Amino acid sequence: MMDMRAQTTKTMEIPEEEKRLEKQLCFAVYATAHAFTRAYKPILDRVGLTYPQYLVMLVLWERGELPVKMIGEQLDLDSGTLSPLLKRLEQGGLIKRIRDLRDERQVIVSLTPKGQAMKGEINTIMTAIGQAAGCTLKEMAEMRDMLHRLRGNLGRTGTGDG
């Protein structure tokens, strides 16, 4: 395996075999992300959530009420993407949005009792995805940690958005 870290300023010679689509890390991550979304769909359909809505709910279950801006930062979503998600969650009775009394520019998002009660579905969802992935919790944690490191590295080099 080639060590790409040592080559920072000059172009390296890469064997032709390594240039094939199936050898590209970026394609493996891209295809896996799509596979995850497809695997989550039938599971989340049962609880009435889309995958992006599920991510918003995870943030709120973990952190409690938050300004919209902080949810966007946590999920790396801009307000144009996040606002419609929040609107649908609010229409579903899972969250409520109110203006911050201390700063009218900010909107605070919190779970409703119905949204809080849905937290009990996390174990079912995570178990189903774990079974679909065919990985142990330890293996999933190792892969997640490697992906976090990769994302951080890409963000620092300016070749990705972090």
Image (spheres, rainbow, N blue to C red):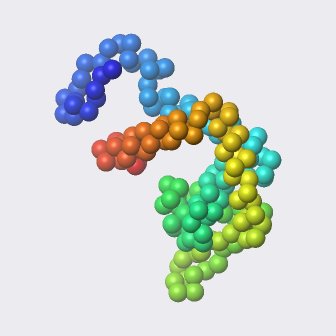
Residue 141 vs residue 90: left or right? left
Any part of residue 90 in sight = no
Quarter-wise, where is residue 25 in the image? top left
Q: Classify 84 as above or below 64.
A: above
Instruction: Give the image quarter of residue 129.
Output: top right
Q: Position of residue 142 (x, y in %)?
A: 47, 38
**Picture layout, residue 112 above or below residue 124:** below
Residue 82 at x, y = what percent? 59, 59
Q: Nearer the viewer, residue 149 or 157?
A: 149
**Residue 64 placed where, x, y %?**
60, 69
The answer to whether residue 47 shows anywhere in this view is yes
Residue furthest to the right = 46
Nearer to me, 27 or 111:
111
Which residue is located at x 70 percent, y 46 percent?
A: 125
Q: Is residue 122 left or right of residue 71?
A: right
Q: Position of residue 128 (x, y in %)?
A: 71, 40
Q: Quadrant of the N terminus?
A: top left
Compared to residue 157, the image places residue 111 above or below, namely below
Q: Residue at x 19, y 29 (%)?
A: 10
Residue at 49%, 20% (x, y): give it.
Answer: 22
